[in-house]
Amino acid sequence: MNERMYATEARRIISYARVSTGVQAASGLSITAQHQAVADASAARGWQVIACVTDEAVSGSVPVGERPGLSTALAQLERGDADALLATRVDRLARDTLETLLLFDRAERSGWEILTLDAPDGVRTHNGRLLVEVLAMIATHEAGMARARTKTALRTAQSNGKRLGRPSRQPESARVLAAQLQAEGFSLRDIAAALEAAGILTATGKTTWHHSSVAALLRSTDELSDAGEQALAHSRPEDSPS
C-alpha cells in the first residue's frame, strides 16, 4: 500500500467498496476489509467517514451509472454532503480505463475528490494522475485476461466435443460460474452462496442451493470444470482484499 501522505485538512469521506462475485458478497469478508482499510486511513488523517457504500456482486466492467451503490455515493458528493470518495484501490472504482478517468475528471470538475489508498494523491498532481492512469490500464488489462481465460476454457471444452453439463435442466450460467469458482479453489458452500446471490435457480427451480446440489452440478460438468481449471490455474479472484 502506498504510504505517501494525504492532505491533512478535515474531510467528510464516503467509503466505497465493491466485490464482483457472489461468494465475496455473501461472505462479507472482502467488503469488511475494504471499509476497515478506508476507516483506518481516514482516522489516521483526522477525516470523518460519514457513509459506507457498497456494490455487491457487481463487476468492475459494469458502467458507473448502472451501479446502485456508486450512483448513490456520487449523488451525495454532487449535493455537497461529502468532500471525497475513498476506496482501497483504483480497480474497485472500475475495470475500464476510460470509465475510471472520466470518473476522476467528473470529480475534479465538480469540486469534490476521488481518492484511493493505492493512488493517494488522486489526480491533484501530474505524478498522481500518471499513477491513476497506469493503475486503470492495469485493471483493464487484468479484466480482459480473465475474460480471455474463461473463453479459452469454454472453447477448449467445446472443441473437444465435450457436453457442457445438462442444458435441458441447468442454465449455462450456473455451470460456468460453478466451474470457474471451483477452479479458483472455492468450497461447495461458497459456490452455493454465489449461485444464490446471482439469483440462479437450481435444476428443480428452487432458489436455495446446498453443497450437495452444487456437487451434483459439478459432477455433471466435469469436462468443463477440468478445462476451466487448466485455464484459470494461475489466476486470482478479481476482488481479492489484498
Image (cartoon, helix red, strand yellow):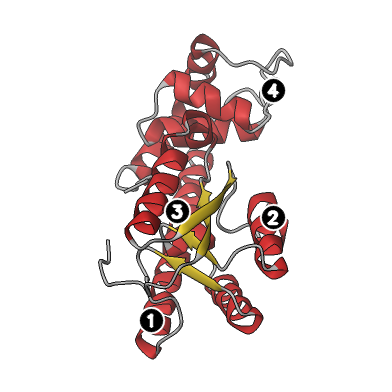
Amino acid tagged 2: Thr
Q: Which mark is residue 128?
A: 1
Element type at mark 3: helix
Q: Quadrant of the N terminus?
A: bottom left
Q: Which residue is disc 2 drawn over?
A: 72
Amino acid tagged 4: Leu
| Distance in Å between CA atoms under marks 4 and 3 | 25 Å
From what the image shows, is residue 55 above or below residue 79? above
| Distance in Å between CA atoms under marks 2 and 3 | 28 Å
Within 10 angstroms of label 2, few (less than 14), some, or many (20 or more) residues? some
Determine if residue 162 is in view: no
Residue located at (35% from left, 72% from top): 6
Q: Nearer the viewer, residue 184 or 70?
A: 70
Circle 1/circle 3 CB separation < 8 Å? no
Residue located at (63% from left, 56% from top): 70
Within 10 angstroms of label 3, few (less than 14), some, or many (20 or more) residues? some
- Left or right for 74, reference 38: right
Q: Among all residues in the image, which is located at the extreme top?
A: 212
| Distance in Å between CA atoms under marks 1 and 3 | 27 Å
Amino acid tagged 3: Ala
Q: Which residue is disc 3 drawn over?
A: 146
Q: Which residue is disc 4 drawn over?
A: 201
Q: Upstream in the sequence, badge 4 or badge 1?
A: 1
| Distance in Å between CA atoms under marks 4 and 1 | 45 Å
Within 10 angstroms of label 4, few (less than 14), some, or many (20 or more) residues? some
Element type at mark 1: helix
Determine if residue 33 is in view: yes
| Distance in Å between CA atoms under marks 2 and 4 | 29 Å
Q: Upstream in the sequence, badge 2 or badge 4?
A: 2
